[in-house]
Image (cartoon, rainbow, N blue to C red):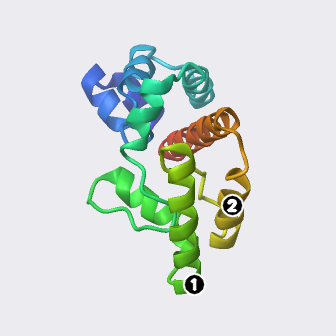
Amino acid sequence: MQLDAFNQLSTEQAQAAIAHCVAIPRWRQAVAAARPYASTAALIALAGELAQEWDETDFAQALTAHPRIGERAAGEEKEAALSRREQAAVGEDATLRQALREANQAYEQRFGHLFLIRAKGRSGEEMLAELRRRLANTPDQERREALAQLREITLLRLEESFA
């Protein structure tokens, strides 16, 4: 999308245009309400500042739209397609997929939510290693890491939307 076109959209259209970035309505509303943006850099900077304000409710909302690492996202919406592309590095390796399933299960039992990681640019083995490493975190440490990963995912998707 071109920044000028984004600046000209209605508020509802602007929110819809960035809905694939993260399932946090108040973030999308705030990003859309701050238009017009003088540059893509200004848009990304403000979006990043707004992402620093996310709380437990926002985190829970965002989790609803993320598949488990190693599982194929279902659906035809843009976010599902992005998740499938971002996790392509997992491939069809049955051993890796099984290890990810087991590690995901252990993670969810320990922390009560699914594991979030910026998959883009990481191999399946790297994601598995990171999942296993983070199992040793305290709940507070893990919440901070998971939120940081959610911010990375969101801003990466936003940047790609305006590239």
- Furthest residue in direction front, as rendered: 109
| Marks 1 & 2, CB-CB < 8 Å contact | no
Badge 1 amino acid: Thr
Badge 2 amino acid: Arg
Q: Residue at x 58, y 29 (%)?
A: 44
- The disc at residue 132 is 2
Percent across and percent down for residue 162 are 50, 41
Secondary structure category for the residue under label 1: helix
Q: Is residue 111 visible?
A: yes
Percent across and percent down for residue 7 are 40, 23
Report, in whole angstroms, how far the alpha carbon at label 1 lies from the one at label 2. Answer: 15 Å
Nearer to the camera, 61 or 133:
133
Nearer to the camera, 160 or 53:
53
Percent across and percent down for residue 98 are 52, 77
Quadrant of the rendered image containing residue 9: top left
Relative to 92, residue 55 above or below: above
Q: Which residue is mark 1?
A: 95
Relative to 110, residue 57 above or below: above
Q: Residue at x 52, y 23 (%)?
A: 54
Disc nearer the start of the sequence (1/2):
1
Quadrant of the rendered image containing residue 53: top right
